Image (cartoon, grey):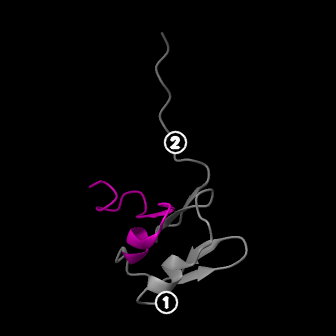
Amino acid sequence: MPEAAAVAIRPSVRDNGIMAIDDMLCMHCGACVGTCPTNAIFLNEVYLTFNEDCTQCGMCVKVCPVGAIDYPRGHKLATMR
């Protein structure tokens, strides 16, 4: 019996090392933008983006109603869930 292939990140998840965003889940509601204490989140017609001002405080992760935002792969809090 062949070995199971390693599970890859869902293709809809963008992980740029700042935060990971699941573009298929994101509803573009803007809740994360309003809660960011450093104004590091930008919402345009297509993508949610984070800039280098992001401190990975997790406020956006907590407020996202659909769980579209998470810590990037390898982040200590991403492995604690």
Indicate the secondary structure of the residue bearing disc 2.
loop
* Helix, strand or loop for disc 1: loop
Relative image position of residue 64 (x, y in whole percent): 47, 69
Tell me which amino acid carries mark 2.
Ala
Within-10-Å neighbours for mark 1: few <14, some 14–19, many 20+: some
Query: At 43% from the left edge and 74% from the top edge, which residue is drawn?
Result: 60
**Drawn side of residue 67 relative to residue 48, left or right:** left
Residue 61's tag is: none
Query: Mainly helix, strand or loop, the magenta region?
Result: loop
Q: Tag 1 or tag 2, which sits nearer the N-term?
A: 2
Q: Amino acid at mark 1?
A: Asn
Q: How many marks?
A: 2
Residue extending farthest to the top is: 1
Residue reaching furthest to the right: 45
Q: Nearer the viewer, residue 48 or 28?
A: 28
Residue 75: say if magenta. Answer: yes
Marks 2 and 1 sit apart, C-alpha to C-alpha, by 31 Å
The residue pinned by badge 1 equals 39
Q: Nearer the viewer, mark 2 or mark 1?
A: 1
Which sits in the foreground, 74 or 62?
A: 62
Query: Where is residue 12 drawn, in percent x and y?
Result: 61, 53
Image location of residue 19, percent across then percent down: 47, 68
State whether residue 24 is above or below residue 32.
above
Can you see residue 81? Answer: yes
Instruction: Kindly identify which residue carries mark 2.
Output: 8
Q: Is residue 52 above or below residue 80?
A: below
- Looking at this view, is 64 or 4 the one in front? 64
Residue 74 in magenta? yes
Residue found 59% across the figure and 64% down from its top: 26
Q: Which residues are magenta?
A: 59-81
